[in-house]
Image (cartoon, rainbow, N blue to C red):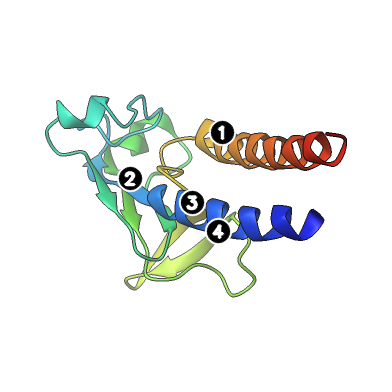
Amino acid sequence: MAMIGVIFSNNFVSPFSALLRRCFQCRSRGELGSCKDPFTFNATDVEKESGVAAIPCASGWCGKVIEGGGTYAVDDYDQAIQRMCVQRGPDDNQDRCANTVYNYKKVYMCFCQGDLCNGNEKAINHRNTMKLIILGAIMLAVVYNRYI
């Protein structure tokens, strides 16, 4: 019975998670544009917003790059934020943010894996919640079938 649960979970979770591989794609500078932080859009909002899209991402890894800006609020006009699908994530497959060099510029870059995770931090928590719900349902089905 446990073997059925393992087979079921491998066949169910993988195709399900493959459907959840989109990233926000946009770029804005300063206070202008829709890509700035805080990012307030979800999957249905972007259909109506010019310059913001939810695109399929084959790698499943999304990125967010913060370029420019400074210590003072007056420097924020030069800050650019870009959200995109990246070809591959970090070698250790861990979500993270760090200062790095991207396109020959010093930037702050974040990597995350999951559906529209480069919108905000809540999306990452939502992905983990979905995994727990699916795992719980599978375990409940296995236990239920064992005692019937």
Residue 142 in picture, x, y percent from top left: 77, 43
Q: Total number of numbered labels?
A: 4
Residue at the spot of label 4: 11
Mark 2 or mark 3: which is in front? 3
Label 4 neighbourhood size at 10 Å, few (<14), some (14-19), many (20+)?
few
- Say which amino acid is labelled 4: Asn
Q: Is residue 43 left or right of residue 88?
A: left
Residue at (38%, 44%) from the top-left corner? 69
Residue at (72%, 52%) from the top-left corner? 5
Inter-mark Cα distance, 1 to 3: 13 Å
Secondary element type, mark 1: helix
Residue 106 in picture, x, y percent from top left: 43, 63
- Residue 148 in sight: yes
Q: Is residue 137 above or below residue 68?
A: above
Inter-mark Cα distance, 1 to 2: 23 Å
- Say which amino acid is labelled 2: Ile
Residue at (65%, 60%) from the top-left corner? 7
- Residue 66 in sight: no
Q: If you read the primary sequence from the N terminus, does the residue marked by circle 2 or circle 4 appear first?
A: 4
Q: Which mark is residue 61?
A: none
Secondary element type, mark 2: strand
Residue at the spot of label 1: 126
Inter-mark Cα distance, 1 to 4: 21 Å
Q: Is residue 106 left or right of residue 27?
A: right
Q: Are marks 1 and 3 in contact (CB under 8 Å)?
A: no
Q: If you read the primary sequence from the N terminus, does the residue marked by circle 3 or circle 4 appear first?
A: 4
- Say which amino acid is labelled 1: His
Of residues 69 and 96, the one nearer the viewer is 96
Mark 3 or mark 4: which is in front? 4
Q: If you read the primary sequence from the N terminus, does the residue marked by circle 1 or circle 3 appear first?
A: 3
Residue 147 in picture, x, y percent from top left: 88, 35
Of residues 10 and 79, the one nearer the viewer is 10
